[in-house]
Amino acid sequence: MKLIRLVTSTMQYLSEAVGHIFAPNDDHYPATGALPFQGDPNYASLWLD
């Protein structure tokens, strides 16, 4: 009985993961896509070790 419960819970876990991967996107990005960086780069910054 314990083995059947383990197999059932494993199959449920895997099916939920597959369903999450292949579900339609719910992202709300703008229709223009990714926008380029419009700021000035900070050339004065230095890496200090």
Image: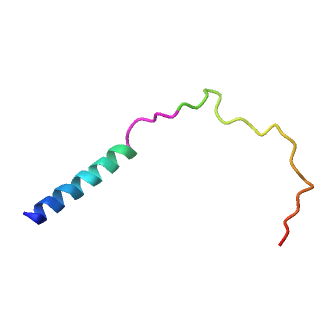
Asked if the stretch drawn in magenta spans residue 26, the answer is yes
Q: Nearer the viewer, residue 9 or 37?
A: 9
Residue 13 located left or right of residue 21:
left
Numbered circles on residues, count: 0
User: Predominant secondary structure in magenta?
Assistant: loop
Q: Toward which corner of the image does residue 28 lie, by quadrant? A: top right
Asked if the stretch drawn in magenta spans residue 43, the answer is no
Q: Residue 25, percent across and down? A: 45, 36
Q: Quarter holding the C terminus?
A: bottom right
Name which residue lies at 22% across and 55% down: 11
**Extreme-left residue of the structure:** 1
Name which residue lies at 30% across and 47% down: 16
Name which residue lies at 61% across and 28% down: 30
Q: Residue 26, percent across and down? A: 46, 33
Q: Toward which corner of the image does residue 6 lie, by quadrant? A: bottom left
Q: Which residues are magenta?
A: 22-27
Q: Toward which corner of the image does residue 8 lie, by quadrant? A: bottom left
Whether 22 is drawn above or below 14: the answer is: above
Q: Quarter holding the N terminus?
A: bottom left
